[in-house]
Image: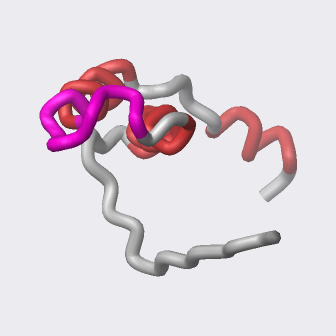
Amino acid sequence: MELKAYLDSIQPLDAAAIAKARERQAQLAKPPGSLGRLEDLSVQLAGITGKGHNKIEKKHLLVFA
């Protein structure tokens, strides 16, 4: 597939999924905003995938010092 076809396939973020993700964040047992950028990334991922709750199968944790 050529680059133009890939670029044409990019869709805007799903506003409904973003709203669901924000609602879910508000229901979690944690202070609002306590996870910082991670919360923003989860909402953005919801907008990209169109799902209010995403599961990440392969998780990795990298620690740099």
As drawn, is 8 to the left or to the right of 46?
right
Which sits in the foreground, 16 or 8? 16
Q: Please, which residue is most extreme toward the right here?
A: 3
Task: Answer with left or right where residue 43 lies relative to residue 53.
Answer: right
Q: Quadrant of residue 57?
A: bottom left
**Residue at image coords 49%, 26%:** 13
Residue 43, position as x, y percentages in the image: 42, 34
Q: Residue at x 26, y 48 (%)?
A: 53
Residue in the image at 51% along x and 35% along y: 36
Residue 4 image position (x, y, % from top left): 83, 39
Above or below: residue 28 compared with residue 58: above
The question of residue 59 being in magenta is answered with no
The quarter of the image holding the C terminus is bottom right
Is 31 included in the stretch rendered in magenta? yes
Compared with 27, 63 (above or below) is: below
Tell me where residue 20 appears, x and y as whole percent.
Answer: 22, 29
Residue 48 visible in the snapshot: no
Q: Which contiguous range is marked in magenta?
A: 25-34
Q: Quadrant of the N terminus?
A: bottom right
Q: Main secondary structure of the magenta part?
A: loop
10 or 40, which is in the foreground?
40
Image quadrant where residue 54 sits: bottom left
Question: In the rendering, at what x and y percent does residue 3 appear?
Answer: 86, 47
